[in-house]
Amino acid sequence: MQLTKNDLAKHYFYKTELIQLCRERRLPTYGTKAELNYYLSCYLDGIPSKEIQPLRTNNRKALTKTDINLETKLIGEGFTFNEHARLFFANYYHVKKFSFKKEMAIIKRRVETQNQTEYTVRDLIKELKNSKKIVNTPEEQTYQRNSHQNIQPNKLLSNRLMYLMQYLLLI
């Protein structure tokens, strides 16, 4: 598929479509919709695909509930937001059923992007407790599924440096 900056800005793409577009252009295919949009935007700005590197790495080794504790590092040890993490947080917060928050995923992605290898589950909990709701980030924009007419990724992503600064300085 021929893709232009205008197409990227005006058309709503599902994540699976963005992955396919990235795959066809030999771009990284792992990440959030905002990250995939970023890779495509860089490519459409003329950056060769071999120079576009993933913002985060994919660590597939997942920990179990018994492996997770407050000192578990968010990156490098296999921590993921899965059923085991859900059970850990339910136990920690003394609730029967725990639901992950978008803010948790956004914080984890920021930690991965900034390679904050010492950031722990305790740090995540503390940051969630002390921070205001994360709003108006490039990633948050991708959650607005059917209001894509109001989202203009081209404007968000046209200046790569500005995007990276915004992405890395979420808080």
Image (cartoon, rainbow, N blue to C red):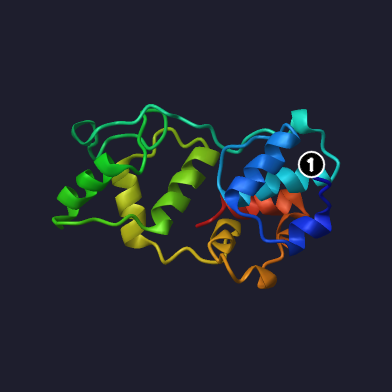
> What is the x, y in percent for residue 43?
79, 41
Q: Which quarter of the rendering shows the N terminus?
A: top right
Q: Is residue 91 above or below residue 134?
A: above
Q: Is residue 114 above or below residue 155?
A: above
Q: Secondary structure at mark 1?
A: helix
Q: As shown in the figure, which amino acid type bears the numbered disc 1?
A: Tyr
Q: Is residue 89 above or below residue 116?
A: below
- Which residue is rendered at x = 56% and y = 65% of the image? 145
Closer to the camera, 15 or 63? 15
Near mark 1 (Cα within 10 A), the count class, few <14, some 14-19 or many ≥20, is many
- Which residue is rendered at x = 61% and y = 71% of the image? 147
- Which residue is rendered at x = 59% and y = 63% of the image? 141
State left or right for residue 38 relative to residue 140: right
> What is the x, y in percent for residue 100?
33, 55
> What is the x, y in percent for residue 86?
26, 47
The image shows a total of numbered marks equal to 1
Q: Which residue is mark 1?
A: 43
- Which residue is rendered at x = 18% and y = 33% of the image? 66
The residue furthest front is 1
| Location of residue 83 by image quarter | top left
State left or right for residue 143 relative to residue 126: right
Closer to the camera, 75 or 87? 87
